[in-house]
Image (cartoon, rainbow, N blue to C red):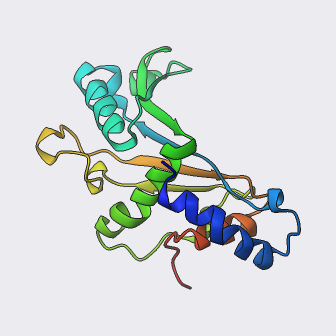
């Protein structure tokens, strides 16, 4: 079954984006490529249960088992040795990506406390958008009683846009809540 937002993108939004961005070729219209979710926590290096809870929470949020990220360098000040687990990451593509994006915009964003919109300055110059969340409890999939620690996460939405304006138009047409200036 095709996700609702993907179907809407194919049937309506491609033509609108072609007009807005003045693009003639349908294949040149920007589209979502992938969504990467990262959670990092230094406690995971010493506490096995912290790593386990991060994996469980990210699995519930994304619907996909995350990859455990390990330290590339030893840092004595943080008591981290090379190879110690320090975070988890998941890359969503295809239908899972579209469903996550739809759930994120429609369900999760309204649950963020004191939310006034995401800044347009968070684009990286190539049309990709990065944002940070302070707590994982805004996701309805995470059970409040089972949460050991409140930890934030980074979400990067990668697009095929060549520049920030193309990425902005794509996300704006997909209903992404940007802050009004």
Which residue is at a point 73% across and 72% down the rendered structure image? Answer: 15
Q: x%, y% of residue 164?
A: 73, 65
Q: State the residue lying farthest toward the left.
A: 145
Q: Is residue 4 left or right of residue 135?
A: right
Q: x%, y% of residue 16?
A: 71, 76
Q: State the residue lying farthest toward the front.
A: 1
Q: Is residue 108 above or below residue 118?
A: above
Q: State the residue lying farthest toward the right.
A: 24
Q: Is residue 80 above or below residue 98?
A: above
Q: x%, y% of residue 46?
A: 30, 19
Nearer-the-camera pick, 42 or 90 = 90
When asked about the image quadrant of residue 133, the answer is bottom left
Q: Is residue 29 left or right of residue 100?
A: right
Which residue is at a point 35% across and 34% down the rendered structure image? Answer: 59
How many numbered circles are shown?
Answer: 0
Q: x%, y% of residue 39?
A: 41, 39
When asked about the image quadrant of residue 181, the answer is bottom right
Which residue is at a point 31% across and 33% down the rendered structure image? Answer: 54
């Amino acid at each position: 079954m095709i996700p609702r937002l993907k179907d809407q993108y194919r049937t309506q939004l491609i033509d609108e984006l072609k007009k807005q961005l003045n693009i003639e070729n349908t294949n040149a219209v920007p589209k979502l490529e992938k969504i990467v979710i990262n959670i990092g926590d230094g406690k995971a290096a010493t506490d096995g249960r912290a790593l386990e809870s991060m994996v469980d929470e990210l699995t519930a949020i994304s619907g996909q088992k995350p990859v455990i990220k390990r330290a590339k360098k030893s840092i004595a000040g943080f008591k981290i040795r090379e190879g110690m687990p320090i975070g988890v990451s998941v890359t969503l593509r295809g239908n899972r990506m579209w469903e996550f994006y739809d759930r994120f915009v429609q369900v999760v964003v309204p649950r963020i406390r004191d939310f006034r919109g995401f800044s347009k300055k968070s684009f990286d110059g190539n049309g990709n958008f990065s944002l940070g969340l302070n707590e994982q409890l805004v996701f309805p999939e995470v059970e409040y009683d089972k949460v050991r620690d409140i930890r934030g996460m980074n979400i990067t939405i990668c697009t095929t846009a060549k520049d920030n304006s193309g990425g902005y138009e794509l996300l704006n047409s997909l209903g992404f809540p940007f802050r009004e200036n």
